[in-house]
Every structure is written in structure tokens, then in C-alpha cells.
Amino acid sequence: DHLADRSDSLQKALSAMRELAIRDDLTGLYNHRQVLDELTQELERAKRHGQSLCGMMIDLDNFKEVNDRYGHLAGDIVLRECAKLLKTRLRRIDILGRYGGDEFIAILPATSSQNAEGVAERLRSSVSEHLFQVFKHPVHLSVSVGLLAFEKFEQLSPQNFIDQTDRALFKAKNLGRNRVCAYSEEIPDSIEFIPTKPGESEKDD
């Protein structure tokens, strides 16, 4: 019994260590490395079973202003709350990770392009309508979303997947933020990002 208990304790400790290794410390979502591993697995599964797969790169608009005005601790509060909000709007089989900084990546297995567009818009509107509380200060934020929807994956690698969602995201940023843009081959390889001028709101763009 003693050996069994010790083995069980070791297994639990190993499981806890593995969770720490794959999770982002701040948000509790998958970290950068793990979300790329998950993406690789989902791409292989989609190819093997002939399923569709959609992905999104999600970026908080003007997040730097939160850090500059309220401090980096406030920024951490916003990132945690945003992560929780995004996760509650996705299915249990969907994968959500923190790609880096204020960028999140979502992977939606077995999802059509039409359904993915609906999910992306739901995520965008959820953040836009949410009132973040930062040290008792109400803060309105928005996200820009780059969407990639593919049904044929023969030539699509994880890096291609990331690059194309990123290009769609920069298009959304370039068009004024707080919107969803789907990837298309017509998007130039290099897009000049035009930042919002001080005092301009995203809705005014």
C-alpha cells in the first residue's frame, strides 16, 4: 500500500509538472510552444480524416495604452480576463492559446468557414461589449481577428497556417481594428500597418 501510494503521488506530481510546462503562467491557456504542437496535431488529423480546420489570430487593440495609463499589472489583469472571456465563447474541443504578448490563437477543428466566421464575430463582439474593470476603472477594449478557413490541407504547414492568419490579422488592423478579416490570396505579402492617430476611436476609422 505504501508503494502504491508513493507511485500515485509521483504520477500526480509528474502530471502537475507537465501542466506547468504547457501552460502560460499568466492566463492559464496553452503557451506558445504547446499551441504550435496542438496545431501540428490538428493539421495532421484534418489531412488524415479529410476534415476542415479553421484558425484565428486574435490581437487586443491598443493594449499598450492600458499598460501606459494604468501600469503593467493592469495589463496582466486585462489579459487574464480577456483569455477567460474568449475561452467561454469557444467549444470544449476548440484550442485556445496565448501566442505571445497580447496575441491569442484559436484552433477550431472540424469547422466550416461559414461557422468559423460566426465564431470569430462572436469573439470580437464579446470583447467589444465587455466592460473590463481595472483597479475600479472601467475600460473598453476591442480585438482584431485574422481568420483562416481551409478544407484542403495538402500544402498547408503549421508555419503557413500561422503566416496566413497573421496576414489576415494585419489586414484587420490596417482597416481600422475591431473587425474580423478572413485570409485570401489577394492579401499582399507585406501590408503597411497604419496606426490609429491619438484621439481617434476605432469606430471612427
Image (spheres, helix red, strand yellow):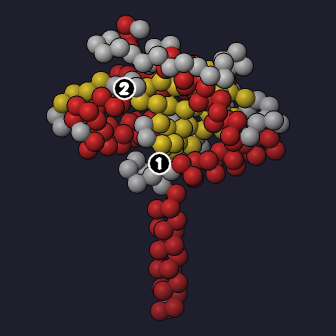
Residue 205 position by quadrant:
top left
Residues at circles 1 and 2 in contact by the CB criterion of under 8 Å:
no
Q: Is residue 115 left or right of residue 1?
A: right
Q: What element carries label 2?
A: loop
Q: How crowded is mark 1: few (under 14 residues within 10 Å), some or many (20 or more)?
A: many
Question: Closest to the observer: 153 or 110?
Answer: 153
Cα separation, mark 1 vs mark 2, equals 22 Å
Instruction: Give the label, 1 or 2, closer to the camera.
Output: 2
Outermost residue to the bottom:
2
75 sits to left or right of 88: left
Q: In this view, does 89 lie above or below 184?
A: below
Residue in front for this viewpoint, 132 or 170: 170
Work out whether residue 106 or residue 177 is closer to the camera in this orientation and state it: 177
The answer to which of 125 and 173 lies nearer the viewer is 173
Q: Which residue position holds label 1?
A: 29
Measuring 47% from the left and 92% from the top, which residue is drawn there?
Answer: 2
Q: In which quarter of the image is residue 138?
A: top left
The residue sitting at 35% across, 31% down in the picture is 63
Q: Which amino acid does label 1 sit on?
A: Leu
Q: Where's residue 23, x and y in %?
A: 48, 55
Task: Say whether disc 1 or disc 2 marks the residue closer to the N-terminus.
Answer: 1
Tally of numbered discs:
2
Q: How crowded is mark 2: few (under 14 residues within 10 Å), some or many (20 or more)?
A: some
Q: Is residue 122 visible?
A: no
User: Residue visible at 48% across and 42% down?
Assistant: 100
| Corner quadrant of residue 185 | top right
Residue 109 appears in the picture as rendered: yes
Amino acid type of the residue that numbered disc 2 sits on in the rendered structure: Asn
Position above or below: 6 against 142: below
